[in-house]
Image (cartoon, rainbow, N blue to C red):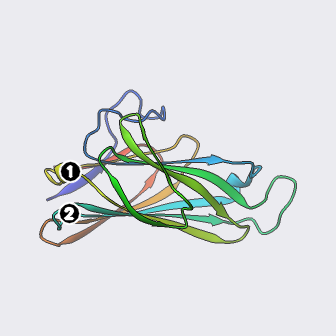
Amino acid sequence: MPLNWHQPSSNSLYSGLVDQKWNKDYLMTVDANLGAFKSDYFVDRSIDYTINLSGEVPKANLKITYKHNAKEKDWMTKDYLTYLRVYVPDKAWLIDSKNFGMPRFENDLGKKVFASIVKVPLGQSRTVEINYTLSKEITNNYNFLAQKQPGINDEPINLHIIDKNGTKKDYETILNSDIVLSSL
């Protein structure tokens, strides 16, 4: 199954709108600073996403790593506190999570949303891990859309696909715009 990265052809490429028509595998992470002053400037984010299509039901493992690079508290910087919302396909079902508090579940804009507060102390890293199942339909002609949160740039994303035969393929890029990984 050869796949390639490309930008979707859409008028709303940089608008931040959730693609409500996309019915394949999907991911959008949205952070909302909760009174952490200007700490966003010092926080690097990265995404590692593994999709396992080899079982009866597709399983996803999402890791979002936050690295708070500030060394000391001052008038504009303190521990990073965010309300993280993770948009995934509508039929996703949460199995478990780590460093994700007490998750809330919502349906919003045709997507399932897992949400919780995440705290990252000054000078430390924290990895949020979320495991969930997806609908069997996404295994047919696998395609993946990652949408970027406006205002967040240079976010590395690594995608690992384990196909029906158990073969693993790895892809990586920088999320500076919405991207699609699709079958050729």
| Residue type indicated by callout 2 | Leu
Give the answer, above or below, for where 20 lies relative to 139: above
| Residue type indicated by callout 1 | Ile
Query: Do callouts 1 and 2 mark residues in contact (Cβ within 8 Å)?
Result: yes
Q: Residue at x 51, y 55 (%)?
A: 103
Name the foreground residue: 4 vs 66: 66
Seen as rendered, the residue at the extreme right is 75
Disc 1 residue crowd, few under 14, some 14–19, many 20+, Cα 10 Å: some
Task: Name the residue carrying label 1.
Answer: 138
- Image location (x, y in percent) of residue 3: 21, 55
Give the answer, above or below, for where 127 lies relative to 105: below
Which secondary structure lies at badge 2?
A: loop
The quadrant where residue 61 appears: bottom left
Q: Quadrant of the N terminus?
A: bottom left
The quadrant where residue 101 appears: bottom right
Task: Name the residue carrying label 2.
Answer: 53
